[in-house]
Amino acid sequence: MAEALISVLLEQLASVVFEHTKQAVTLVLNAEEDVHSFSSNLKAIQAVLEDAEKKQVMEARVRDWLQKLKDVSYEMDDVLDEWNTEILKQQVEHGKKKSKGCKMHDIVHDFVQFLTQKECTIIEAVKGANQRVELPGDYKVRHLTLINEHEGQLPTSFDNCKNMRTLTLLDSSITTISPSSIMQMKCLRTLNLSRNKLNEVPKEIGELIHLRYMDLSWSRNLKELPDAVCDLYNLQTLDVSWCLKLEKLPKAMGKLINLKHLYVGGCGALRYLPKGIGSLKSLQVLDQFKVCEGDDDEALKLGDLRIMDQLQGILRIQYLGKDDASEIEKAQLGNKEHLPHLRVIFLIPRVDEDEDEEQRKGDSEIVKALQPHQNLESLSILACHGTTESLYWINSLRNLRKLVLYAWKFCEVLPPLGILPSLEILEILRMTKLKTVGVEFL
């Protein structure tokens, strides 16, 4: 039954593929060769399945045709992904619209996932440092996890992993990855190098055009990413959180038009986010925004968040200064209905006592301009020099469950927070001048 269903799927796929891809493949180098390869692969899958449906096959033969099916399916997936990547490249560089023909790639990709659910290999490094971990020659590894790799260069030969989709290193201390290793993994979709000791990422990373997910978090020696990262048009998740020495991201981040998740929290040395991030309309997660004094032409400003209405999860805005009210207003936080958590941290200025009044006015204007969407579930505001009178909009947050007010230097009276219908947690910390809490809590 399963074989019949798959065969029907492929028959339908074959009937539409060439009509849709005929337009798209003109954008790809050597497109004619790829078309013939795709045609041959598709026919091979159908032939094998038809043979299996017609005959009572022995178990060994079942394994044989299933393996053939997997191999050619991977090849189909790669070809379609390359077409899709080239179209994305044309879209970025020349403003062309994405062809509808590439939507079929999702069908093939789901089909491949169905066929290859158990092709995983886990290897624990037990040899001495700098020893190569060799894989048996008959392995067709698609998903590889390496554990306890020693400090130094990744000591693994990927000669047998040219079709590998996933590489994960756990409890390891890799400092470098050679360009040759990168070039052997051109089909990679997921790269997880979290908590290693990477000093740099080779520019050859840009050759991994199929890459969707890259986790470099907790790479404490990493100072920058190569510009080639911006050639990863299919990348959907980039995690560089807690890369403590990371000073900058590539300028051309706006080319990553499929990027949905960008994690930069804990990057204490990161001076600013590149301006191009403001054009990423598909971005759903931007966990931290650090207000900076960078040049308007190169640094992302708060106002650039205005088109990011798909933001989800938590948004942390750090180091707000007294002059940032207009930028907060431009950010239009009230339009971000999918954003449940907001954390705002004000800059603690080193000012004379005579300048406190100016700081109070500036901070109050910022709080007035916040006005998040009524779907907000948690709100934290830290180190504000304004008064809670500027929180006049808070009663509109009918879904607010948690509120944290920390170190409001001049706050004496709280707004009537007890009337918030969903409020479960209220934290009031270091409010040294607070005198009055509303009776509605009684």
Image (cartoon, rainbow, N blue to C red):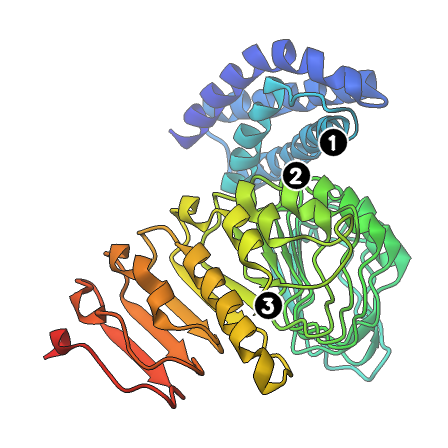
Which residue is more in the foreground, 379 or 196?
A: 379
Q: Which label was assigned to residue 129?
A: none
Mark 2 and mark 1 lie on one chain; the one further toward the N terminus is 1
Q: Residue at x 44, y 57 (%)?
A: 370
Mark 1 and mark 3 lie on one chain; the one further toward the N terminus is 1
Name the residue that disc number 1 marks. 92
Name the residue that disc number 2 marks. 257
Q: Position of residue 21 (x, y in %)?
A: 66, 16
Question: Do tag 2 and tag 1 residues touch (Cβ < 8 Å)?
Answer: yes
Q: Quadrant of residue 232?
A: top right
Left or right side of 285 for 153: right
Name the residue that disc number 3 marks. 321
Left or right side of 126 for 20: left
Quarter of the C terminus within the rendering: bottom left
Residue 293 vs 175, above or below: the answer is: above
Q: CA distance from mark 1 to mark 3?
A: 35 Å
Q: Secondary structure at mark 2?
A: loop
Q: Residue at x 63, y 21 (%)?
A: 42
Q: Name the kind of residue labelled 2 in the image.
A: Ile
Q: Position of residue 362 (x, y in %)?
A: 53, 66
Q: Name the kind of residue labelled 3 in the image.
A: Gly
